Amino acid sequence: MDKLDQSPKSWTESQVSTWLRSIGVKEQYIEKLYEEEVDGRILVTLDVAFLKTEFCMKSGPAHYIIQKRDELINSKQKSQEKKKPTKTELEQKNNQNQCPSTTSESRPPHIPGRDQDAIKERERESTLKEDCRPRPFDQEGIDFIYVKHRVLQPESGAFNLTAPCHEFKSFSVAAGLDRTRLQAKFAKEILKFATGCMNIRTNGTIHFGVMDSKEDTGYVHGEIIGIPVKEKDIYVDALDYIEKSISSDKEHVRQCVRPPRFIEVMDQESTEKMYVVEVDIVPLLSIVKSKVYAVRLPNFKEETNKVEYEKETILRRVGSKTEPVSDKDLCDFYQRVKDRDALREEAEKNQFLSAPDFCKDLGRKLTMLMTSGKKFMEKEKWFILVTNRFKPEDLCSVDWLVNMNIFCVFDFDPDSKVSGLCSKYLEHHVANMHSLQSYRKSGDMTIKEFTIDLHLFEQTSWIFCNGQTDFKGSETPCDEMTWIKTKMTFFSEAVSLICKQILPKGTFQVLFLLTSPVEKPLLHTFYEFFRDMEGHEDIICICESQKNFQKWQSFAEGSCGTETVNNSSVVGMKMSHINATLQLIQPVKACASKHLPIFVKGTCLLETQVEEQMYSLEIVTVNHCDETSEDFICEEKANIEQQFYHGGRVNWLNFWLAEHKYVGEVIERDAYHEVSKFLNDALKWNADETPVNSINIYHHPGSGGSTVARLVLWNNRRDLRCAVVKPSYPAGVVAQHAVELREYEEKDPHRCLPVLLLIEDSEKEYLDDLRNELEVAVNTKRIQFGTLCFILLSCRRSYDPERKCKESPLQNVSVTHKLSRQEKRKFSGKRQTLEERYEPDFILTFVLMSEEFNVDYVQQFVEHLLEGIDRKSVVTRLILYVALLNTYVQNSFISQSHCEALLALTIHLERFHQHEFEKSLSPQAKLVFLHLRDDKTHIESIRIIHPLVAKEILLQLLGSQQTQSSLAMDLLHENVLFEHRFGREEYLSFLRALFIRRARISKGDKYDSFFSPLIEHVCENEKSPDKAIELLEEAFQRFTQNPFFAQQLARLHYTYEKFEEAKHWAETAAKQLPNNSYILDTKGQVYKKWFQAKYKAIENDNKPKTAQNTAGAVETALKAIECFQECEKAAEADIETMNSSGFFSEVEVGCSLLKLITSLDVFANRASGHSECMKYLLTPDYIPEGVEGPWEPFHGRLKKLHKTMQDALEWISEDLSYFQTDIGADEEETPESPEEKISHPLTWLAKKSSEYGKYFSESYFTALLKKGQSIPANLTPFQKRMIICHLGGGNVTSILSKLSDQRDAVHLLQSMLSLYPSNPVKAKFGQRDIVNYIVAHISLNCLSPQTQKVAPLKDLQALCRQFPSDKRKCLPSALFLLTLLFWPEDHDTELEKETKYEIVQSAVEHMEKGYWTKKKDLPPRRRRIYTHFFLGNGNGLDKFVHKRKFESVTKGISVSEKRMKWFRGEAWKKPEIAKMLKCVSGWTEDGAVYLEGPQKKKFSIVPLHVPSVPHGNENITFYLGFTFRGPVACNIVVKSCC
């Protein structure tokens, strides 16, 4: 158990947890307080309200904790009060000291029990207090400091006469006296001590402000307390008593007594200035020879209110006391003066004859400290620099700093950016200027968000700790005490954040560079780092001046001891020497230059600052890796090669070493040659070339796809500008940096080399975004069409790369585990070469690769590997955990910091950090673990060498003894991993994905899953759905009742028809996220599945269906519809996502419910049953007797069913009319995915609309129509409308779908139109009916232009005039028809054209508003507008060409590629399209497209593909498309005419 004896204020988080357990607080609250880093300082400030609101604590425990905390503090304070001496006690003690005869024998012999306890307590406390050294004796100009409560060595007597004896005086009461009393008291103590020292010829120091006796209860002997010093001259002038107290040889005493020195006392908990006042006594033989000094000690008498002098006394030091020489010893004392003089003379000679200081090898010491004992400094090691003001001459010797990986600099020089280190650093690197306040993280911000916000790991963070003189903000420099009061807390928070949450131990070193006198804030800095890093081993101090180091040393020694401070400090080396020494051990040459290729075949210099400003790109330069030092290469080349062939990701040094013949060549796979061919083809001039080209590499996981891609970049770095896109940066930022890279040091943006960008493991939509951003940028630059500017080389994992390759053979390349005959030869030869140099175990992945990852080989390999493994060891448990994550979660890993925590490693010395970790692993773990290092943060982690190996390890290690579900449960319960702070967000994201991320083919998975693959494995392979439920329930609790886990539980329960439990979990999720449409959809799905189960049970029951036995099913169906309607409202209110699943599900449940209702005996078994059913559902007051009682709660809702279903169908139709339906195959996978995705929404809508119409119409009449027979004339408009709906004419989308699905379409359209009145203008249709009627005519004309049943264009235009004159009341489909039907024709008069343009213009204004409402804040790629018709060369209705008519041009290729061919403009160039479509003339102004309306008015047209718009003012031609946003321009070409 942690010791809890010290003050609660000084407790650590662990000690707070221990105390909470001791008073019986629940573990969940203890864990929460520990997670939030509640230490003693925070504990004492907490209150009940804060515990309840911030920690979600119940009132009872909150009150209990605060009550117990207060009791503890009160008890501690009472015990302190008992221990502390009162003023009277101190005065008595001082009076005792004034009397020389007071000895230990005169003290009371009896010590009561309580006093004995107090003494024991004090002795125990003394062991907890840190020791410290006294100030160096009698040295001028020493900058020294004491720390309160540290303890000096006990008072001492004379030792060798030159080593000073010490005497302590607390002086706490006397320091508060008036000037006269204070001076008398001070002078008396000095003169007494000084003459005592002089008479026995010993050096000495008397200390005021240091506890001097064990009777000072509450303190220990030698404890530094300090005294307030208001006026220093009071103490200096007190020495004037020398002349009054010494009768002869006064000047001797003056010479031997040094003036008082005032050493400041640092106090962590107070800002009041306190001092230890010290006086040195130096009785040099040349002054005191043959002399004995008598003194009359001054004493302030309260009775007379003045200073009086005691009788003259000769004093001497006896042990640690100063005592008078008694009369009987006086003669002997005088006789031995010569002896004492002789001893003093000998001591002074020895002092000056001592051996000179041994010359230390500071160069080696510096090297060992900076490299952690290795031969070179680690490239990936982060450094935190703490520094103060640099001397101008030292700024010329900082090349070693420029070459280091500096994470941040705590700079105490306010002028640093103007004339200090910062200004010098900015000449070479980019740095972000921050204040201490910048490092205050808001509570709701994650560490990842914080690091992104401050650009940490990308550019050095320069933290001005004491203001910045050139900054106009409120940060101004301040003095030491103001800094401690105002900025100390910010500093403490910044250090804590970096050391405890951002950088794990072992990944960084703190370097104190003391180049000017040390002030108190800098000392506080050391304390903060020492505390938060839990030790000193990664702290180094470099200081040229011994004088500057003294103060630092005196402070640091108290924390970690003299030897440790000396071992980790380099003192006395000039900065120029440090610079030269450290450059020799840096892996890269100082200030090495980098070069890029240029258009005219030379190279240009790439400035480091410019490179760092393009922080989203890893730029591959012409001379990449040339800066690596020769010594480093010779030392590390074998390790670099072996790490790659063991399974590590290829790095640029692998290629560089192979290129320079240090190691063998990297194998060029067949895919490399295919990509190279695609690249060479793209680089050839082609007038039709798009500015951004794409090449895609799809690869099996671990098959070397990344190596192929990077080798392409490496071998093209001299001819193209090459870069890797770093992960997690927005497409806009990457595009901006890519454009900067392309144009860097080039004069003409039209004459630049293309940029080859490698994008690894990114989503397809991210690639689309990046491509779009780059095209917009190219367009903005007005670069000539046909100029290739960017090549996107995408490298993505896939379990079926060959299929991807077949989809687009001219763009996609596959890399698989299978090797071609030629590749087998290469791998065989390479394997032979490698096995001559390395054991096969050390090149495992390459061996497996050469065996093509054959299943039997992998199985045998793992079997051999696991022989003799200790299955119960913690290392084996770690292997299992990593294997489980690697098997189920793509790109997963566990940080090394997590592993060390699990293995309970305590690594005290950083230089042995990696060695100790690897030493702790079993032989099997050493073989299968691959050590990774994050490219950005350099934080280390581990994974299994290959996913297939991970899967096999999992299978064989678990065997029949343990299941994957039990292993996953163990992993959930592994508190050490779950609560470990470093890398916690990433670890929890992997754990979350393990339980709730569904597999997606589009994400490179083997198949699409309904649950996470692990959960599906437990359900299907382990045949244990209950275990899966148990796992998810535990995960729900572990992840603080995350609603998405509750959602998964609901889905899992209803899958296994546990509907009551499913309902509970769905409601639990909805309660936490009541406005999340996806969770509300899940809630609806619970009732939908429940209804389906009940319906199925009724069907299987073989009993007559009655209102009684169907009431439960009807109630459940209505509840499902209600939930889906809630989902719809939430979806429409959410402007950032579009979830239409509620509408689809509502229609599906509605159709199933109608099927159930119509099958009831009361409706099905009578001739007029259907009519009876319709009457019940459509007539407000009519309720058949058979359903009246049992369905009483449902009548109102059932009678609204036809209306709510029609509204849902219309909403779906409208949504599908706006946007393309083939988007979304690669949508981002989140827990917020719809339950059931409709894969073919157009077909679904046509089918469900027809089904809906069937239930509300007489199927007999529909059958007649389909046979071409007439139907009764007395049908109501509603009945006709439902028959039309049944035939497929219920909404715009269903009607237009007849153009795609043309089976019997002409006959069906004619049948629909026959149901409308013969004179529709007089019939006064509703708005929806008019729209459907017109769209049916347009569709019929597209399918059968010769038919006589199609109304002329003018009749349809006349019908449109019945649309509301207030366009805000028009349906979007009505506005669409206005733009379509009233588009002016060439033969129109000017007046007709003007009228038509006004109608179109008015409609477009309102369509634009509707479009933006519908689109929400979604990116264009997710809601891409759909073009229904194009303007053709015909007249009347013949001028409308439906898009389906010419989609045969792109027949036979994938949907996504087809879409891109249209979108990029490739398909428009086909001659068959030019014959069909009319070429419209217009122009562009400032990126906008116009055509000329009547009276030369500008008519704005939206470009379908923005990057195709020339940025200047050009005459253009284009094809005109009609969308629900308005007319759009396609295939924009800069020409004067067609």
Image (cartoon, grey):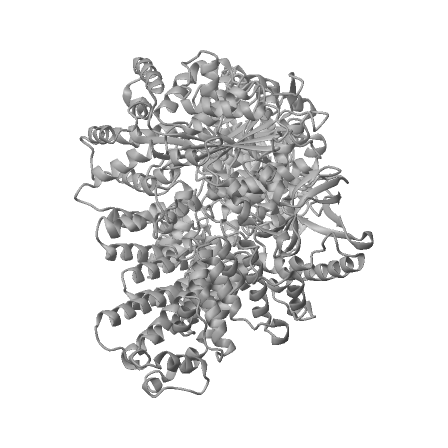
Tell which of 1363 and 1409 is nearer to you.
Answer: 1363
Tell which of 1172 and 764 is nearer to you.
Answer: 1172
- Residue 1415 screen position, x and y as percent: 58, 56
Farthest right residue?
1495
- Look at the picture and state if 784 lies above or below 1392: above
- Residue 71 screen position, x and y as percent: 41, 64
- Look at the picture and state if 25 lies above or below 663: below
Quarter of the image with the C terminus is: top right
Tell which of 678 and 182 is nearer to you.
Answer: 678
Q: Is residue 190 visible?
A: no
- Residue 856 screen position, x and y as percent: 22, 30
- Which residue sits at x=20%, y=40%? 872
Tell which of 1441 and 1421 is nearer to you.
Answer: 1441
Relative to 1267, 877 lies left or right: left
- Which residue sits at x=54%, y=24%? 681
To which quarter of the image does residue 1188 belong? bottom left
- Residue 1400 screen position, x and y as percent: 70, 59
Relative to 1295, 1019 lies left or right: left
For the image shown, how many numbered marks are present on the structure?
Answer: 0
Q: Is residue 661 visible?
A: yes
- Look at the picture and state if 1118 lies above or below 1463: below
- Look at the picture and state if 1059 lies above or below 920: below
Relative to 1053, 272 lies left or right: right
Farthest top residue?
661
